[in-house]
Image: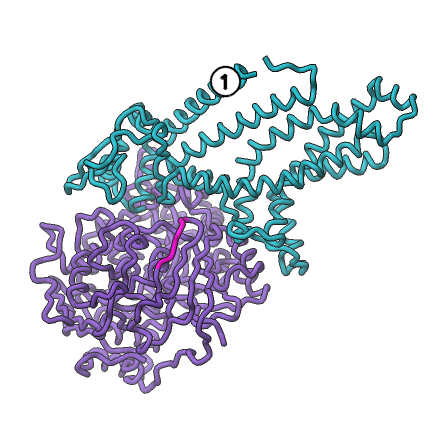
Chain colours: A purple, B cyan
Amino acid sequence: MTKDTGDGRIHPAAEMYADEYRAGLIDRREFLARATSMGVGAAAAYGLIGLNAPARAAEHMQQGGTLRIQQSVKGMKDPRAYDWSEIGNQSRGFLEYLVEYNSDGSFRPMLLDSWEVNDDATQYILNVRQGVTWNNGDAFTAEDVARNIAGWCDKNMADNSMASRMGGLIDQDTGQAREGAIEVTDEHTVVLNLSAPDVSVIANMSDYPAAIVHSSYEGGSPFDNGIGTGPFRPVSMEVGINCILERNTDHEWWGTEIYGGPYVDRIEFIDYGTDPSAWVAAAESEEVDLLYETVGDFIDVMDAIGWTKTETVTAATIVFRGNQEAEVGGMKPYSDVRVRRALAMAVDNAVLLELGYSDRGRVAANHHVCPIHPAYADIGPAAFDPDGAVALLEEAEMADFEHELITVDDDWQRNTGDALAAQLRDAGIPVQRTILPGNTFWNKWTEYPLSATQWNHRPLEVQVLTLAYRSGEAWNEAAYANPDFDALINRANAIADADARSEVIAEVEQLLRDDGVIIQPYWRSLYNHHNGNVVNGEKHPAHEIHLYKIGFAA
Amino acid sequence: MGLFILRRVVVMLLTALCLTFIVFFLTNLYPNLEKLAKTQGNMRMTDEQVATWLGERGYDRNLFVKYGEWLGVLPGYVVEAEDGTVRGRCIDAGMTPEEAPRFCGVLQGDWGYSTVFREPAGEIVFKRLGLTGWLMLAVMCVMVPGALIIGVLAGMREGSKLDRSLSTASIMTTATPEYVSGVIFIAVFASSAVGLKWFKGTATSAMDNITWENFTLPVLTIALYGMGYIARMTRASMAEVMTAQYIRTARLKGVKFRTIVLKHALRNALIAPFTVIMLQFPWLLNGVVIVETLFNYKGFGWTLVEAAGNNDIELLLGVSVVSVFVVLVTQLISDIGYVYLNPRIRVT
């Protein structure tokens, strides 16, 4: 299914993980995520633990057809500024990625052929896939990879979300890639020299803003440029209406002989708005084949009309946080750790999972590290003590303060917020609920005093912890600034070995909980539905739709 | 008559000018501009980034100057950003600053650029107006004849069983809002819940290809709501005419009831409903928001919602101008139509 790493060298840590897997210390998914991010190909990784890589159902698929996907169609922008998974899907047919994250937790090389990581994760050798061409006929080389990585490092581009993930390559003074950080050693090899160890480089290369663009692309909508390496070509798109791709018959796609596909001739993303009942109507009218995501009670509704459900367990979650710098009536209610902890103690996470998300997930423990993350450390469930919570609030002289809990008007987030508010009221803590429509809510999502935010799944725990809780990060919505935390997370980012890292992560988890930074009630399973004819349309933990894999049942 | 039309056109221009200025003022309030910057740039931008973004795109200048530029009476701005890229109102993609025209406003036929849809605002407005036009046409074809027939049947014999049952039905349809009747129709005629599945519960495919299946429910939803209202007006007007002296005279002369209704009463009875029907146009144009959203038919109402929700300034202005135009033109037609229906009225 995939090639092994170039020279057949297996990273020592990967062999260690295999031992751990056999000893039952980690599960298969976790093993795959760890081993493949060390540069071991998926097939080799399966081999290490004595399994055969799962064969894909290619023989059951027919060639051709139009795949219609219900999905919001959002405005295209420079890939580095992508802020929605949907935008990534819209261009994924022609703009490919170096690495692909798969729902079994493994990383699979795409435009890279393989990669090697040195033992302390400061040097990455990227072997660029040979025989890949752009759809205008140009050859795809190491220069293309280096140019794109350099582009990710551009801190001067205001909305470049890749810059914060490429810290080890950036010269902080110029805000550009550091001299010597990205070396092209030959036509098919790029060496990355990091200033500090970073274990998440490969995972970051698989994320949706990391789409690889051609040298002629100069910003704006990639649909206008249209040059990519993928098997489809852009046809048209209208924001809020539809986005159409078709199979690029003039272009020989490298992946056909390696991974198979593409199977369908035409792909239409059709926007049916944000109301799930409209998606059901579209499904019942046979106007779509595949739903982007099915949420809440609509999972049962879709089951009832006879569509096929797919499920993926993820680290996607909802986080309630007080913004520690936000002012309400002249004071900062959530700057007091007692207030924050009291709110967390007054809430039973299992109830929120049941009422807010109909038990479709796993109970979480207020520290934003999921059991499927490689370096997860079990520090026990979060405390539930409503009486203690009220006592803490009284001590802080905040017992009478009326909290205003803001959520977006979105089925499950609203329900979870309502359940949380109800629990606070049960404990005797006054709380008021505010529900804002999506287009208003996201304008100031980091600034609300007390609100809920959905966080997508990320393959490694250090990714989300760095992004969301390190001081001064753009997405640090809790305005959390704790030097101890920063020191710990920087240390964790330097430990390539997930087992060793999990000791630091245990401290991080405890610190987040002691500081009462978040109430993080549960991990969501994600679902989607298809009409029963779609093969390989399973929900992906990061909402990716790998268009080349999908086809119709023969 | 010519003077009358001219006066109306001037009023129309003035109204459009005032309305667009109000819309322009509201959409250019700073919080709205901030929202625009964040939806266009990145939702997680800082305040400084927002200020730079707005500055580079000329949003941070005097309101009247910006409005003048939109109208096309003042030259478009040209701003040089810190990194040396030059942006200007009149500089389109692929154009150098030297090539760009000095003025590019409504007077020059440039309706501006929609920030949400990333297309020229004029194109979007007319494309979406066309889609709503089809919906309106279908609704009018169902609603007007239906309402008139019901109204005339009910009004010609006031107090009869037929009158009572038709009146009750009209009141019921008018009292049921579209978001209720639409949902009921989808549940009954388009879902597995009831199992009829005669029609489709979404009109998205009707944007490319209108069929019986995908267009019936949205049309019916709107038509029924308006139908009851017009039917009630027609009934009242008809009932009044039927009590007039000349109808009694005709009956005493022995004219057939059918002839009385069709030849003598109908024309007089249609004057009041005619105004109501013409008033339905502006209502349909913007009132279809609910139905367009419910059935996912991306027409004019949907565009209005998207433009307002995302503070898309130039698209909103375009929508406003078109709305003013449609409202005043239909009222003009209704005033002129009056003269033909009722010779006692003169337009001077």
Front-most of residues A161 and A401: A161
Location of residue A169 by image quarter:
bottom left
x, y (%) of residue A329? 35, 33
* Residue receiving disc 1: B6
Residue type at numbered disc 1: Leu
Neighbours of disc 1 within 10 Å: few (<14), some (14-19), many (20+): few
In depth, the one of B51 and B226 nearer the eye is B226
Tell me the residue at 41%/28% (across/down). B23
Residue A213, placed above or below residue A397? below
Q: Is the stretch drawn in magenta largely helix, strand or loop?
A: strand
- Kindly tell me whether residue A461 is visible in this rendering: no
| Part of the protein shown in magenta | A234-239
Residue that protrudes farthest toward the bottom in the picture: A50
Q: Residue at x 34, y 74 (%)?
A: A29
Tell which subunit mark 1 falls on.
B
Residue under the image location 79 percent in, 33 percent down: B154
The answer to whether A98 is drawn above or below residue A486 in the figure is below
Residue B57: where, in percent of width, then height? 25, 36
Residue extending farthest to the front is B2
Question: Where does the N terminus of chain B fall, quadrant-wise?
Answer: top right
Q: Quadrant of the C terminus of chain B?
A: top right
Q: Which element type, helix, strand or loop, lies under badge 1? A: helix
Q: Residue furthest left?
A: A179
Quadrant position of residue B314? top left
Question: Can residue B305 be seen at all in this image of the molecule?
Answer: yes
Q: Is residue A104 left or right of residue A284?
A: left
Relative depth, front residue between A444 and A546 = A546
